[in-house]
Amino acid sequence: MNRVLVTGGLGFIGSNFILHMLDQEKGCEIINLDALTYAGNPDNLAAVRQHPGYREVHGSITDSSLVNALMAEGVDAVIHFAAESHVDRSISDPRPFIDTNVVGTQVLLEAARMHKIPRFLHISTDEVYGSLGEHGYFTEDSPIMPNSPYSASKAGSDLIARAYSETYGLPVIITRCSNNYGPRQYPEKLIPMAIIRALRDQPIPIYGDGLNIRDWLHVEDHCRAIHLLLHQGKAGEVYNIGGHNEHTNLEIARLVLQHLGKPESQLEFVTDRAGHDRRYAIDAGKMSRELGWLPQHTFAEGLRQTVEWYVAHPGWWGRLVDGSPGQP
């Protein structure tokens, strides 16, 4: 792939993917279209800002004129990360999620159709499947049953992507990943939030009884999977990408405290989130059977490395949390 348009590349997963691509795919050119919302952090890609294969464009995926102009340059693939993604924010105000996740995705798909882009990867989430019982796993054929405005907006974007594939023959691949973790994740998410609050000896809020279960995937394993699908994925298909690491939210918070030598008295149980899905778990067997992909990070080692990264980069998260240099 010579020229790739990445949307939302200043966010958590997008920035990690761009770093991965520039390291692994010599000679490629990355155009990063990012609206620089609160979760888009220029610091995430400071190391490659002068890289000859990297270009940053500030703008929204809902801006059809800008999107069309970029695709008119000649793009070999679109990798669409850009999304509003925090469930709590979607409960407080659903409208930005509809605008960005649904309308923005349609703008990108239409531009890709008009310019005959040969590859379009739509990055989605396992949350579109809804809540799972104590047993079993979501497969690519599981029905979509979202329960929050966020997951509903992502489900809507998935269906629009599918429609462009089926109706217009646009070569779309949809990926649905489990919860990501790793360096450069915005501090409102569970793992970085727990690390930062533990470092500052602040209470760590735990929704309800803390027994909601998520499958955790290291962001580098996710990036490897996307890179593989970019070259070998089958157009029109959905691929689940999971880490095979199920843990309750309470277990995650306790593990963070243990890594940092902090007491469990920092845990603070709070009123549960509205519509809080009990368990997510996905079967990523299709990725392994068809493409030979498996996660390389064990959760124990990946979490340790993640904790160490946040400990070593207080300036990065401090500016996001409170504008300070980030001293614990």
Image: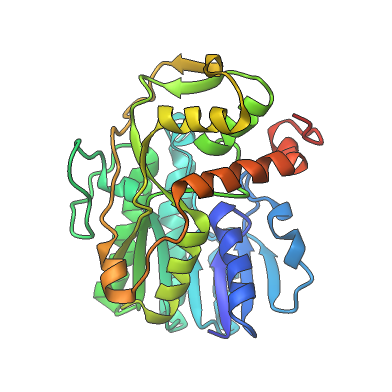
Residue for point 59% across, 80% down: 25
Residue for point 46% across, 65% down: 107
Q: Which image quadrant for residue 265? A: top right
Asked whether, in this view, residue 55 is left or right of residue 99, the answer is: right
Q: Which image quadrant for residue 273? A: top left
Judging from the image, the colouring scheme is rainbow
Asked whether, in this view, residue 20 is left or right of residue 228, the answer is: right
Tell me the quarter of the image containing the C terminus.
top right
Residue 120 seen in this snapshot: yes
Which of 218 and 77 lies nearest the eye of the viewer?
218
What number of labels is visible? 0
Residue 225 in percent (x, y) is at 43, 67
Residue for point 26% across, 63% down: 285
Residue 111 in percent (x, y) is at 47, 73
Query: In the picture shown, does residue 186 fall above or below 230?
Result: above
Residue 189 seen in this snapshot: no
Which of 113 and 233 lies nearest the eye of the viewer?
233
Asked whether, in this view, residue 299 is left or right of residue 30, the answer is: left
Residue 108 in percent (x, y) is at 47, 67
Residue that lies at the very extreme toward the right in this rendered image: 325
Which of 86 and 256 lies nearest the eye of the viewer?
256
Which of 133 and 153 lies nearest the eye of the viewer?
133
Query: In the picture shown, does residue 259 fall above or below 31?
Result: above
Residue 48 in percent (x, y) is at 74, 67
Asked whether, in this view, residue 220 is left or right of residue 139, the answer is: right
Q: Which image quadrant for residue 211? A: top left
